[in-house]
Image (cartoon, rainbow, N blue to C red):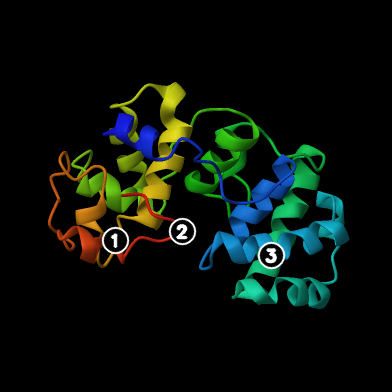
Amino acid sequence: MYRELVRLYPDAHCELDFENPLQLLVATVLSAQTTDRRVNAVTPGLFARYPTAADLAGADRAELEGVLRPTGFYRAKADNVIRLAQALCERHGGDVPGDLDDLVALPGVGRKTANVVLGNAFEVPGITVDTHFGRLARRFGWTAQTDPVRAEREVGSLFEPKDWTMLSHRVIWHGRRVCHARKPACGACGLARMCPSFGEGPTDPDAARTLLRDGPRA
């Protein structure tokens, strides 16, 4: 199944735009309850105004809320970003640590966010169990776990660590484009012949193709 995902998504990558670990960390925190596309529309202006952790830590809350408003839940996100930046300055000299334990000890940073940062900013392999990954891993029969940490460990045991980061990207891409939560495009899915959940969505190819998003991946 993974070989087929590699064939389908050879160009898979993190869909959050970033230039350094701080930008990726903040963008990942902001991506909660919104789309990567919306975050990418906001972050250029955000990082132009607040390029360092110290700048974010000292940001005027009202101004920061104004910048973050398009991402939704902007008051809570402004508070999260300020507290995160303050912790980075106090504990790590304003730098983002490249260690899982240090990352998850930061305010508002869980394993999912930490693995995104480690895998894409530091090239430390990690599995990102977001809603897409968890849903597909269960549909594929790779795990029955609904707890993200347990799912991460079970799926991780099936693959070489060197593949974990790209596995995450490709599964998430497939979840966003083909294997949707409510109505997966089963009849237009390259994994159909191998998937134990085939039939949860339309199996007719023409009907399934209408469900494909962000470009056909039949």
Q: Indicate the position of residue 2 as horizontal and vertical percent values.
A: 31, 32
Q: Can residue 147 be seen in this view?
A: no
Do the residues bearing badges 1 and 3 touch, measured as CB atoms within 8 Å?
no
Crowding at mark 2 (Cα within 10 Å: few <14, some 14-19, many 20+): few
Do the residues bearing badges 2 and 3 touch, measured as CB atoms within 8 Å?
no
Residue shown at 25%/53% (left/top)?
Answer: 188
Q: Indicate the position of residue 175 as horizontal and vertical percent values.
A: 36, 53
Q: How far apart are marks 1 and 3 (CA)?
A: 29 Å
- Tell me if residue 193 comes above or below residue 125 in the rendering: below
Residue shown at 31%/60% (left/top)?
Answer: 180
Name the residue tied to disc 2.
214
| SS assignment at label 1 | helix
Pointer 1 or 2: first along the chain: 1
Amino acid type at circle 3 is Ala
Q: Locate residue 121 relative to residue 113 in the image: left or right.
A: right
Pointer 1 or 3: first along the chain: 3
Numbered label attached to residue 41:
3
Task: Name the foreground residue: 123 vs 197.
Answer: 197
Task: Name the foreground residue: 200 vs 147.
Answer: 200
| SS assignment at label 2 | loop
| SS assignment at label 3 | helix
Task: Please state which of the two labelled residues, at mark 1 or mark 3, is closer to the viewer.
Answer: 1
Q: Can residue 189 be seen in this view?
A: yes
Task: Please state which of the two labelled residues, at mark 2 or mark 3, is closer to the viewer.
Answer: 2
Numbered label attached to residue 209:
1
Q: Locate residue 121 relative to residue 12 in the image: left or right.
A: right
